[in-house]
Amino acid sequence: MERREGKKRGKFNAAIKAVELVKDGWLIGIGSGTTVEVFLNELGKRIKEEELEIYGVPSSYQSHILAIKNSIRVVDLFQFPELDACFDGADQVDKSRNCIKGGGGALTREKIIAHASKKVYIMVDYSKVADCLNIAVPVEVLPFAYGFVRKKLSLIGKPILREGKGKLGPIITDNGNFILDCDFGEIKNPEDLETYLDTIPGVIETGIFSKRIIDEVIVGTEENSYIL
């Protein structure tokens, strides 16, 4: 219970620091997940108190609903193909700022938004920081290619089809695809693995967000936050 509360405070402190970075009139990319939820709720308070105008491109229905609730003007990449900054969470981050994302299933839209942004800020609590990436990597797969992709991934890792809880069958992403959670063990070179996975026909996107697109990782501790 104590550790859970510590992680909760860590998420809050990371989100608060990120909210301070947002400027009036900004177009922001909005990720998904529990830390992003805290970020949006705190940003909503600042928008109300300071009468800010903030525009946002959400990566999921969850963040879309929360953005509207917090007075962010929802737009899309048709209108604004370049964003001032992206704010997102991560499932794991290494000391070099490489990330694994996609636990919530929105990895493809999250990566598109990240690449469309001038700056990318990742918010995590201290428990998400590791010396080396080692958790399962979500891989979004076109259903037609599922069998083929699973076979290819089995040559280098252990892929498992993500299935629903309370609903039989596979999880379907907002894009209508499957997700394979693939255990590659310790990932020594995330950029090389990301590049290889992207060459497999039928792979839509991977949950590896390499350091080349991440500008800052904001790590929240129980007392404050720091930049990785």
Image (spheres, rainbow, N blue to C red):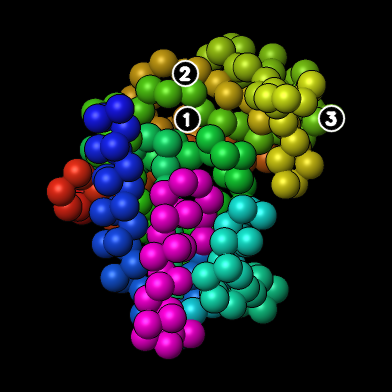
Vertical placement of residue 124 versus 72, above or below: above
Whole-number angstrom distance, CA of label 2 to CA of label 1? 9 Å
Label whose residue precedes the other's in the sequence (2 or 1) = 2
Tell me which residue sits at (46%, 63%) in the image: 40
Asked if the residues shown at circle 2 and circle 1 are in contact, with their CB atoms under 8 angstroms apart, the answer is: yes
Few, some or many residues within 10 Å of mark 3 (<14, 14–19, 20+): few
Residue 46 position within the rendered picture, expressed as x and y whole percent measured from the top left = 37, 76
Tell me which residue sits at (65%, 71%) in the image: 76
**Residue lying farthest right?**
144
- Whether residue 82 is visible, yes or no, is no
> Residue 144 got which mark?
3
Look at label 1 and name its amino acid.
Leu
Say which residue label 2 marks: 184
Residue 67 position within the rendered picture, expressed as x and y whole percent measured from the top left = 56, 66
Few, some or many residues within 10 Å of mark 2 (<14, 14–19, 20+): some
Look at label 2 and name its amino acid.
Phe
Label whose residue precedes the other's in the sequence (3 or 1) = 3
Whole-number angstrom distance, CA of label 3 to CA of label 1? 23 Å
Magenta-highlighted residues: 30-53
Say what secondary structure mark 3 lies in.
Answer: helix
Residue 146 among those drawn in magenta: no
- Disc 2 or disc 1, which is closer to the eye? 2
Q: Nearer the viewer, residue 130 or 155?
A: 130
Dominant secondary-structure state across the stretch colored magenta: helix
Say which residue label 1 marks: 193
User: Taking 168 as reference, is 183 left or right?
Assistant: left
